[in-house]
Structure formats: structure tokens, C-alpha cells
Amino acid sequence: MNESQKEQLLNNIHAAMYDVPERIQMRQLAHFYNADPAYGKGVADKLGIDIKRVEIFAMMNLKELFAATSEEEYSREAEPVV
């Protein structure tokens, strides 16, 4: 993929995710980051989400990730527990 195509991909994903609740964005960003850190960072940057928080969620297993990003547990201010 050339740089123009990568930028278009990031723009398309941003457009699809910008109005999704942050906890769901974070869950998806963790998957993107685990697939390719540059991809996860690119989408996080477009969404204005700190990549350091994404990295914490990306270290979790699926059960932990789903629990940490549940409606009951997720908080923008709180650091996730690993």
C-alpha cells in the first residue's frame, strides 16, 4: 500500500469510528495495534486518543480487554489495570 492509500484507509476508519463510544474505539484500537502498531497508532492519532493508553489495552488478553472496555468498567480518566 502506498502512502496515499494508507492515508485514505486511516481517513475511512476515522470516519466510521469517530462517533462510536470511546470504550469501543479503544477495544478496536487494541486489535489494530496488535495487528500492526503503526496502523493502531495512525487510527488513534486520527481519533485523538493517546497511544500509550492503547498500548496498555493491547497487552490484555481478550477476556481482560472486553472486561476493561465494558460499559460498567471503562473510564476515560482511569488507567486500565493489567
Image: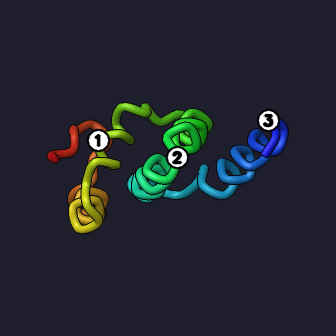
Q: Is residue 59 left or right of residue 12?
A: left
Question: If you read the primary sequence from the N terminus, does the residue marked by circle 3 or circle 1 appear first?
Answer: 3
**Residue drawn at point x = 34 percent, y = 37 percent:** 53
Amino acid tagged 2: Asp
Secondary structure of the residue carrying numbered label 1: helix
Q: Tell me where residue 55 appears, x and y as whole percent.
A: 35, 39
Q: Tell me where residue 77 appears, x and y as whole percent.
A: 27, 36
Q: Tell me where residue 75 appears, x and y as whole percent.
A: 27, 47
Q: Tell me where residue 48 appears, x and y as whole percent.
A: 53, 33
Rounded to the nearest whole Å, what is the CA distance between mark 3 and mark 2?
15 Å
Amino acid tagged 3: Glu
Report the residue marked by disc 2. Answer: 36
Q: Is residue 25 left or right of residue 16?
A: left
Circles 2, 1 touching at the beta carbon (< 8 Å): no
Return the mark for residue 56: 1
**Residue drawn at point x = 60 percent, y = 50 percent:** 18
Report the residue marked by disc 3. Answer: 3
